[in-house]
Image (tube, rainbow, N blue to C red):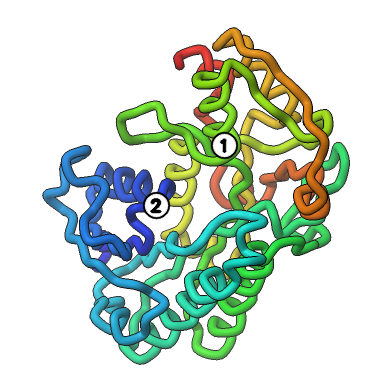
Amino acid sequence: MKNNAIVLGANGFIGLNLCYWLLQHDYEVHAISREESFAGEGIFDIDNLSYSQVDIAQLEELKRVDFKSASLIYLFAGQTGTSAGFSKYMDYVNSNEIGLLNILNTYIAQEATGRIVFPSTRLVYKGIEGKFLKEDSEKETKTVYAVNKLACENYLFAYSNAYRIPYTVFRICVPYGQLIPGDYSYGTLGFMLNQAKNQGEISLYGKGEASRTYTHMKDICEIVGTVSPMEKSSGQIINIGSKDNYSLFKLATKIAAQFRAEVNFKDWPALDLAIESGDTMFDDATLQNIFSYQYQGDLDTFIQKL
């Protein structure tokens, strides 16, 4: 069981890259997703990988998963996004909260013992201008997704307290880049790249003044994969940081310069302004105390190679 891992949400952006990292580090990986087929098939060697189609929101489907066989259970399944959660609240609650509760209760019923590893988000924090946020910084949940994530962190604590389930939470700010082949990038950076390449301009709400921490996927996978088996990470909530911390405007100007695009400003739509978090840059002292880590990702180099 030592090198056996389950990755739920294996077809997602982080889940797929994490599968790749685990396979490179001699894990037997059981990949799980709602889709019929595995997105990594044909991209990388899957000799040590099995795949199952399971919807974690459906308890009877989840019972087919053998949690007792794994030392690490990575829960990277669920709905992401900001404003969409207000209209699709049932999807968000089912995929994010009910999914985790189903996993926890199936885990208990099977008498599993592996570590549950959960990704949380910058959106649980109340942004503070110019400040790096620590894990105990003030929280403010402005979206259904943020509520889901903070609730899941609390579910993990409650079940761990009651049933001694080992877990680790990693809070991730803005991921970019990939381990697997290709130059696709998810989320904020991917959106800007797509605009610069296809439209010749990048649009920012307001003046793009909000600052973020941008972390390359190889750093995220290296940290998650290396730290999650460590006993001293059990029960911990851990920020993943980066060398790259700056405003959306500065990011946009870097990308625009590479593609000879323009940066334009737009008025904030009312809903988007209401849910904007402000500056969310991560203090990673907790991580460094557990695992002294030198970040490999460099956003300038990444952009220059596109």
Is residue 300 shown left or right of residue 57? right
Residue annotated with mark 2: 12
User: What residue is rendered at 62% in x and 10% in y?
Assistant: 257
Residue annotated with mark 1: 215
Question: For the C terminus, which image quadrant?
Answer: top left
- For the question of whether residue 128 can be seen, the reply is yes
Q: Earlier in the sequence, mark 1 or mark 2?
A: 2
Q: Where is residue 299 in the image (x, y as percent from the top left)?
A: 57, 23
Crowd rating for badge 2 (residues with CA inside 10 Å; few <14, some 14–19, many 20+): some
Crowd rating for badge 1 (residues with CA inside 10 Å; few <14, some 14–19, many 20+): many
User: What residue is rendered at 50% in x and 84% in y?
Assistant: 164
Q: How many labels does the image show?
A: 2
Front one among 133 and 82: 82
Is 222 situated above or below 104? Answer: above
User: What residue is rendered at 44% in x and 60% in y?
Assistant: 76
Q: What element carries label 1?
A: strand
Is residue 282 shown left or right of residue 18? right
Is 67 situated above or below 273? Answer: below
Is residue 202 shown left or right of residue 141? left
